[in-house]
């Protein structure tokens, strides 16, 4: 019997609630715990990526290959913050006013993550949203794969994002303890 078949048979023999849990389904209380822990983790990743980007620039000169990959990882981490904010709001774990400061970066974060994730398609002229590829300001014209000062695609300023994320981290609870055995869930604030 193949390992996958063996695993499937073992899981199928378990009680339904345990099967759901093993297959990734969580109850809402556990989701709250994971959503907050994930948000804190991705916020920390954003801060770490900014540090890595700036260290790369210092060590290797302006926007080199190492910087480009660190910048892309920053975009991914930034977008994961927004995914977790959405999850937290869906769960009614925290209120939207807590996230107002970082929300101003959402549209540019989404666009720059998408453009850089599909950069090869855009370089080939096959990107899905070509009108957004180039962006002009008084400071100059850049495409989404470029960096102008501290702005990715001349739109998303990584230092401003990092400052907003750092302030968010200081306002977030440290953890959420799920409700169990008739006791309500609650926050750990340290």
Image: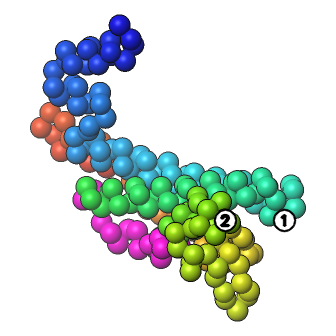
- As helix, strand or loop, the secondary structure at mark 2 comes to loop
Q: How many labels does the image show?
A: 2
Q: Quadrant of the N terminus?
A: top left
The residue range painted magenta reads: 92-109
- As helix, strand or loop, the secondary structure at mark 1 comes to loop
Colour scheme:
rainbow
Magenta-span inclusion, residue 95: yes
Q: Please tell me which residue lies in front, 110 or 128.
A: 128
Q: Please tell me which residue lies in front, 143 or 158.
A: 143
Task: Describe residue 133's horizontal placement relative to residue 95 as left or right.
Answer: right
Task: Describe residue 48's horizontal placement relative to residue 37 as left or right.
Answer: right
Extreme residue toward the top, this view: 1
Label pair 1/2, CB-CB below 8 angstroms: no
First along the sequence among labels 1 and 2: 1
Does residue 104 lie above or below 6 as drawn?
Answer: below
Residue that numbered label 2 is attached to: 124
The dot on residue 62 is 1
Is residue 10 visible in the rendered structure shown here? yes
In the image, what residue occupies the spot 26% across and 38% down? 26
Percent of width and height locating residue 6: 32, 12
Task: Give the main secondary structure, helix, strand or loop, of the magenta stretch.
Answer: helix
Q: In which quarter of the image is residue 91?
A: bottom left
Task: Describe residue 83's horizontal placement relative to residue 51 as left or right.
Answer: left
Q: In which quarter of the image is residue 157?
A: bottom right
């Amino acid at each position: 019997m193949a390992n996958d078949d063996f695993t499937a048979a073992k899981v199928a023999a378990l009680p339904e609630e345990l099967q759901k849990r093993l297959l990734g389904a969580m109850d809402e209380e556990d989701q709250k715990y994971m959503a907050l822990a994930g948000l804190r983790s991705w916020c920390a990743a954003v801060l770490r990526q900014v540090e890595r980007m700036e260290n790369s620039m210092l060590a290797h000169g302006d926007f080199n290959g190492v910087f480009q990959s660190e910048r892309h990882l920053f975009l991914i981490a930034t977008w994961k913050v927004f995914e977790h904010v959405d999850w937290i709001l869906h769960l009614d774990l925290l209120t939207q006013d807590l996230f107002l400061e970082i929300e101003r970066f959402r549209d540019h974060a989404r666009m720059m993550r998408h453009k850089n994730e599909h950069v090869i398609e855009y370089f080939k002229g096959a990107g899905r949203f070509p009108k957004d590829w180039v962006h002009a300001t008084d400071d100059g014209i850049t495409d989404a794969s470029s960096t102008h000062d501290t702005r990715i695609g001349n739109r998303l300023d990584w230092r401003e994002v990092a400052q907003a994320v750092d302030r968010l981290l200081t306002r977030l609870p440290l953890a959420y303890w799920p409700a169990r055995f008739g006791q309500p869930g609650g926050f750990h604030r340290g």
